[in-house]
Amino acid sequence: MHDTNLLQLITDDFAPAQQLLELLKTESLALHGRDMPQLEDILAQKQALIILLEQHGRKRSEILASLNLPASRAGLEQFAAHSSIGDQLLTQSDALTQLLADCQAANELNGRSIQVQQATTANQLKILNGGEPPALYDARGSTSMLAKPRALSQA
């Protein structure tokens, strides 16, 4: 009984995990295009999918814990060893784990893209607000500060 429930929970997570991966790919494009309304929509959808995946993950962990097994791959292997559908459980679990790892990699890539955009925006704001003067090369090849910069609003 527990084995079919566990398999069903794993199988049920494939669709939301795949949707999450597609959203992360769409988010990457929206980040590059700086499409804020689309990014807000994607964020709301991502949060709903993540909540669903976390709930299913908790249920899977609870099933293993109720059988006094660790909520880990080792616990699943112990459980699968005594189940008639053990091989299917492990295969589906591995496939879901890989899909979630792909989601995590895409999310990390999007995070790096956000950091680059934040640094670029901060640099542009510093220029607009008259921050540090740019260091330019003089005739001798060393850097020199030419003139005191003024904020763009004062130029």
Image (cartoon, rainbow, N blue to C red):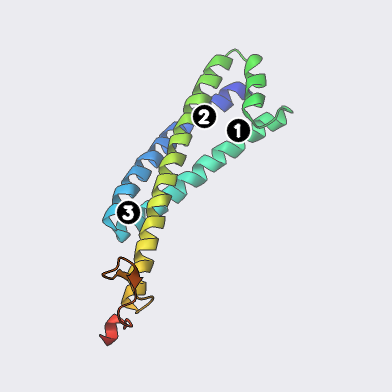
Whether 63 is drawn above or below 85: the answer is: below
Whether 48 is drawn above or below 40: the answer is: above
Q: Which residue is drawn at 47% across and 35% down?
A: 101
Relative side of 76 to 138, left or right: right
Give the residue at mark 2: 10
What mark, if any, has residue 25 been given in the picture?
none
On the rendered image, what quadrant is the C terminus found in?
Answer: bottom left
Give the residue at mark 1: 60
- Circle 3 Cα neighbour tier, 10 Å, few/some/many (<14 / 14–19 / ≥20): some
Q: How far apart are marks 2 and 1 (CA)?
A: 8 Å
Earlier along the polypeptide chain: callout 3 or callout 1?
Answer: 3
Counting from the top left corner in percent of width and height, residue 10 is at 52, 29
Amino acid type of the residue tagged 1 in the rendering: Arg
Counting from the top left corner in percent of width and height, residue 54 is at 55, 42
Whether 28 is drawn above or below 153: the answer is: above
Give the residue at mark 3: 31
Residue extending farthest to the top is 84
Q: Which residue is drawn at 38% across and 56% down?
A: 116
Relative side of 52 to 39, left or right: right
Q: How far apart are marks 3 and 1 (CA)?
A: 34 Å
Q: What element carries label 1?
A: helix
Badge 2 vs badge 1, beta-carbon distance below 8 Å: yes
Examine the rendering and report whether any part of residue 108 can be seen. Answer: yes
Earlier along the polypeptide chain: callout 2 or callout 1?
Answer: 2
Examine the rendering and report whether any part of residue 1 can be seen. Answer: no
Whether 66 is drawn above or below 24: the answer is: above
Q: How far apart are marks 3 and 2 (CA)?
A: 31 Å
Q: Is mark 3 on a helix, strand or loop?
A: helix
Q: Nearest the camera: 132 or 2?
A: 132
Q: Is mark 2 on a helix, strand or loop?
A: helix
